[in-house]
Structures are given as structure tokens and as C-alpha cells.
Image: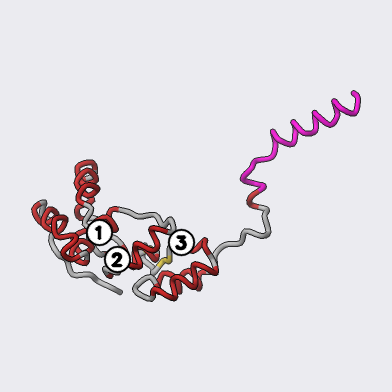
Amino acid sequence: MNRKQFLTTGIIATSVFTSPYSLLANKQDDPKLDKKIVKEFVSAGHGKFEKVKELLEENPTLLNAAHDWKFGDFETALGAASHVGHKELAQYLINKGAQANIFTAALFGRIEIIKPMLNLFPSALHAKGPHGFTLLHHAQRGGEEAKEVTEYLVSLGAKETKIALY
């Protein structure tokens, strides 16, 4: 075997037996997010716009990070802004690339999203978002802009429920 064949065989063997995921797992410059910073960011998502901007500028990977408040109650900063009705903050996060969902669509009164989603997934009418807040709650937080969504959800049987916050 000549030098060229040896090198080619080595490259092929390395590529066959090395998973790209194992290479990523060994990166030292890609640590997990600090849970305290995630909690601070998500907490700020409840209305501290400047703090959200500051933390996101320092660490852009916080954008879709979720904090676990316990008992399966996961929340992102966008989820926080959505259930408190802070549209400006929610829009800022969406503009930065945050992953919007049906709850955020309800906040913004996006009936053209809500109707097909509920046609496809009818049980989502009673789905619980962060802290147990419902679609109806999010639509109500959307005010006049979300009035059509609020009325539609009520026509389907959605009811305001009391939220049990630990």
C-alpha cells in the first residue's frame, strides 16, 4: 500500500466511524446554559424589557431557553411575555427568532392561525401553557386586537379557569 492509498483509507475509516454528534459533544467552547441565567431571562420575560434585551445581547442562545418552574411547568421568555400580555416584548423576541406557538398567536389575535390549529388539534382548546394559562387567557390578554379569537374560543366552549400557581 502506497502513501496515497494509506491516507485515503485513513480518511474514509475516520469518517465512517466518527459521528458528527460525537464531535459536537467534545467541543469545549459550547457549554450548557447556566440555569440561574435562564431563570433570570425567563423571569425578565414577564415584563422587564430592558433586562431581556441586556441578557439576550450578552447570550443570544437564551432566546428559546426554557426554565423549569417544577412539576412540568416549562416557560420561555416569549411564553412569559405572552401570558402577561406584553405584546411589545413578545414581538421583540419573535423578531429575534423566538419560537412562537398557538398561545402567542392567541395573544396577537391571529384567528387565521388559531382556527386551522384547532381544526387539526381540537384538544388544544383546553391546552395549558406556562403556569397553566389557557388559550382563552392569552386571547383575553391580547385585548381588542384578540377579541375575535376570544369570541371564537368561547364559542367552542373555552372557559376561564382559575390557575393554581404553586
Q: Bounds of the magenta span?
A: 1-23
| Residue type, mark 3 in image | Leu
On the image, numbered disc 2 is attached to which residue? 87
| Quadrant holding the C terminus | bottom left
Q: Which of marks 3 and 2 is in front?
A: 2
As drawn, is 23 to the left or to the right of 106?
Answer: right
Give SS at disc 1.
loop
On the image, numbered disc 1 is attached to which residue? 108
Q: Residue 40 carries which label?
A: none
Q: Do the residues labelled 2 and 1 touch (CB within 8 Å)?
A: yes
Give SS at disc 3.
loop
Residue found at x 20% / y 55%: 126
Give SS at disc 2.
helix
Q: Position of residue 74 (x, y in %)?
A: 38, 63
Q: Is residue 48 above or below residue 128?
A: below
Mark 1 is surrounded, within 10 Å at the Cα level, by few (under 14), some (14 to 19) or many (20 or more) other residues, namely many
Which is more N-terminal, label 2 or label 3?
3
Q: Where is residue 32 in the image (x, y as percent from the top left)?
A: 57, 62
Q: Distance between the residues labelled 3 and 2?
A: 16 Å
Q: Where is residue 80 in the image (x, y as percent from the top left)?
A: 34, 67
